[in-house]
Image (cartoon, grey):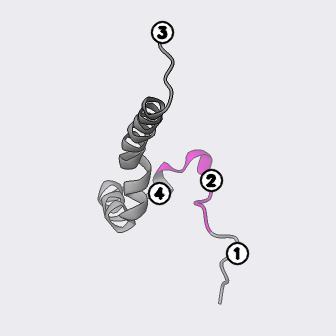
Amino acid sequence: MALLVGWRYGILIGGLVGIIGLAVYPVVIYPMLHIDEYKEIQKQNRRGIRQEDIQPGNMKVWTDPFDRKN
């Protein structure tokens, strides 16, 4: 097995970083850059679902404990 030195090592490392970047982009980076699009998709998917009906164990639906009640 030949050792990778110099520019060949740089191409190997650059290729690995590029492949990892291509794999991570659609899962992590794209949703962070297009928040409004994903919020709209979430609204469409949750349409017709009442959270009170699916809340387990008759637990209260989450509310912000630091929300000021004026």
Instruction: Tell me the tag on residue 66.
Output: 1
Residue shown at the point (57%, 46%) measured from the top left: 56
Residue shown at the point (48%, 9%) measured from the top left: 1
* Percent x, y of residue 41: 31, 58
Say which amino acid is labelled 4: Gln
Camera-side residue of 60 and 32: 32
**Dots 3, 1 in contact, CB < 8 A:** no
Q: Residue furthest top?
A: 1
Camera-side residue of 49 and 27: 27
Q: Which residue is mark 3?
A: 1
Tell me where residue 34 sits by quadrant.
bottom left
Is 36 inside the magenta-drawn segment?
no
Q: Secondary structure at mark 3?
A: loop
Residue shown at the point (35%, 60%) measured from the top left: 38
Q: Residue furthest right?
A: 66
Distance between the Cα atoms at labels 2 and 4? Answer: 11 Å
Q: Secondary structure at mark 4?
A: helix
Q: Nearer the viewer, mark 3 or mark 2?
A: 3
Q: Which residue is mark 4?
A: 51
Camera-side residue of 50 and 47: 47
Say which amino acid is labelled 3: Met
Q: Which residue is mark 2?
A: 59
